[in-house]
Amino acid sequence: DKDGRKAMEYVWINLHRIDNEMIYGVVETPPAFSDSVKKGDAIKVEISALTDWILYTENYPVTPDTSYLIVEEMVAYKQHLLNKPENTEKSEQPELASADDISGIDDIIKNMD
């Protein structure tokens, strides 16, 4: 801006990868003010710039206010595994959730590194 400060734009990003310092994903909401990024763009953002988040699980969305639910589910799942017979068939194991397939996003993100 005119004071020399960096202007900020808040958008939702569909997360595709995260490392120690950066978040990589696709812009899901059209920016209100920025012309440098648009909905559908693959971007990387410093984790320190993260101001809010929602994790969509199979059962419910998890936000900073409900993040304790993740720990509760992890404890319940660990207890389930401890009580499970050793000869359980692989097909009975719960499936891991997968992200929506966005064609070519991995190649775009690799080129950002």
Image (spheres, rainbow, N blue to C red):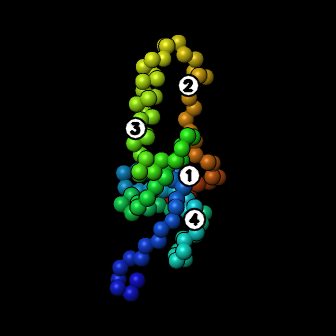
Examine the rendering and report whether any part of residue 71 can be seen.
yes
Q: Is residue 44 above or below residue 58?
A: below
Find residue 22 and report its horizontal and vertical position in percent: 41, 56
Q: Which mark is residue 29?
A: 4
Q: Which mark is residue 93?
A: 2
For the residues carrying marks 3 and 2, which lies nearer the camera in this image? 3
Q: What is the distance, in whole Å, between disc 3 and disc 4 at their CAs?
A: 29 Å
Residue 91 placement: quadrant: top right
Residue 94 placement: quadrant: top right
Of labels 2 and 4, earlier in sequence is 4
Q: Which mark is residue 106?
A: 1
Q: Amino acid at mark 2?
A: Gln
- Residue 23 appears left or right of 30: left
Q: What is the distance, in whole Å, between disc 3 and disc 1 at their CAs?
A: 29 Å
For the residues carrying marks 4 and 1, which lies nearer the camera in this image? 4
Residue at the disc numbered 3: 71
Q: Amino acid at mark 1?
A: Asp
User: Label 1 near label 4: C-beta < 8 Å?
Assistant: no
Image quadrant occupied by the N terminus: bottom left
Q: Relative to the observer, which residue lies in front, 50 or 103?
A: 50
Q: Relative to the observer, which residue lies in front, 108 or 93?
A: 93
Find residue 14 and report its horizontal and vertical position in percent: 54, 55
Badge 2: residue crowd in 10 Å (few <14, some 14–19, many ≥20): few
Q: What is the distance, in whole Å, between disc 1 and disc 2 at their CAs?
A: 28 Å
Q: Relative to the observer, which residue lies in front, 3 or 19?
A: 3
